[in-house]
Image (cartoon, helix red, strand yellow):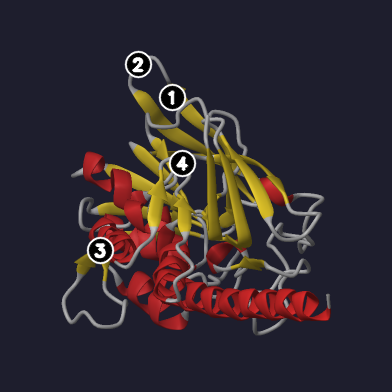
Amino acid sequence: MATHRTKMLIIGSGPAGYSAAIYGARAMMEPIVVQGLQPGGQLTITTDVENYPGFADVIQGPWLMEQMQKQAEHVGTKMMWDTIVDVDIAGGSPFRAVGDSGDEYIGDVLVIATGAQAKWLGAPGEQELGGKGVSACATCDGFFYRGKKVAVIGGGNTAVEEALYLTNHSQDVTLIHRRDELRAEKILQERLLKHPNITVQWNKAVSSFEGDPMGAGLTHLALKDTVTGEESTLDVDGAFVAIGHAPATELFKGKLPMDDGGYLLVEPGTPMTSIPGVFACGDVMDHTYRQAVTAAGTGCMAALDAERFLATLDFAEQEAEAAE
């Protein structure tokens, strides 16, 4: 076990954490990034990225995160392969965190960039058939269903994007939505509804995922009409749950204010939390945009505000010393 001391401690990686690290390192804050269970965040399970500024061609999510990490390290960031299991922030700066390894991390400022994780339906069979026909990431697992029949559950941007992506592998994609209209952006809706290989089942909810976890895996979905209550089944080889994400804020329950969805609350227009010196950036505080480029932007903001906070601390210390 060891103690790691830094001016800027960043919990979590991804576009937000890496961007905060790049700006923090350039400001001579010698940041430490504790990468967590999924270094690189959600983009490491995203294949084609076609909307990140600066790239005319489609790029790969894992490659983009690898480049961000390399850039952060190049300018002076220290990467730690550890997962934070406890934090002590109530007493103000410096802030203390403890890793699963037993190591202690102490930072004059704390940047929270723990991101978000996929939500699950909680229907019978969902977890039992996880990895055996049931998934929450089409870009991760779609390849395994080439030429097979698949379904996507949801009605927002994520669900529509995953359904469209799956047409690269399957000619029989069904989108299941519990309402009679989608919540996705209009341009995505148009692409989906015009696609010849996608069928939409409106007003349907998945009652259970059926199959044999020890054998063939998922075989069909049990559905229920949300209007009439009528029950039906849909034969599928794969089902992708795409109903949104939950912020990874368990560490901070009772320690920082959150909204009803568990997202960390920040001062509007800033990454500043209720505790001076603690900043939140990326999907952990953004339930509206949730894009790689906005996450990177808030990571930059967190680093700039952290630099200002440290300058204020230094000035206060100098004033105190001068008064003695």
Q: Nearer the viewer, residue 279 or 290?
A: 279
For disc 3, the marked residue is 67
| Residue type, mark 2 in image | Gly
Q: Which quadrant holds the C terminus?
A: bottom right
Q: Earlier in the sequence, mark 1 or mark 4?
A: 4
Question: What amino acid is labelled 1 in the image?
Answer: Gly
Task: Count neighbours of disc 4 (C-alpha within 10 A) and say few if under 14, some if 14 to 19, many if 20 or more.
Answer: some
Q: Earlier in the sequence, mark 4 or mark 3?
A: 4
x and y, in percent, of residue 178 in the image: 60, 57
Mark 1: which secondary structure? strand
Give the SS element for disc 2: loop
Name the spot of residue 128 as percent of width and height, x first: 50, 25
265 in relation to 240, above or below = below
The residue at 39%/70% (across/down) is 22
Query: In the rendered view, does 297 fall on the left or right side of 132?
Result: right
Which of the labelled discs sits on residue 276, or is there none?
A: none
The residues bearing labels 3 and 2 have C-alpha atoms spaced at a distance of 41 Å
Q: Choose mark 3 or mark 2, whichever is in front.
A: 3
Residue 175: image location, x then y, percent: 43, 56
**Nearest to the observer: residue 205 or residue 142:** 142
Which residue is painted at 77% across and 80% down in the image?
322
What label does residue 211 carry, if any?
A: 1
Dots 3, 1 in contact, CB < 8 A: no
Towards the viewer: 60 or 111: 111
Task: Provide the residue designation for mark 2.
Answer: 215
Determine the CA span between mark 4 and mark 2.
30 Å
Q: Which mark is residue 37?
A: 4
Of pointers 4 and 2, the one earlier in the residue sequence: 4
Mark closest to the chain's N terminus, 3 or 1: 3
Q: Check whether the beta carbons of the residues at disc 1 and disc 2 lie within 8 A of each other.
A: yes
Front position among marks 3 and 1: 3
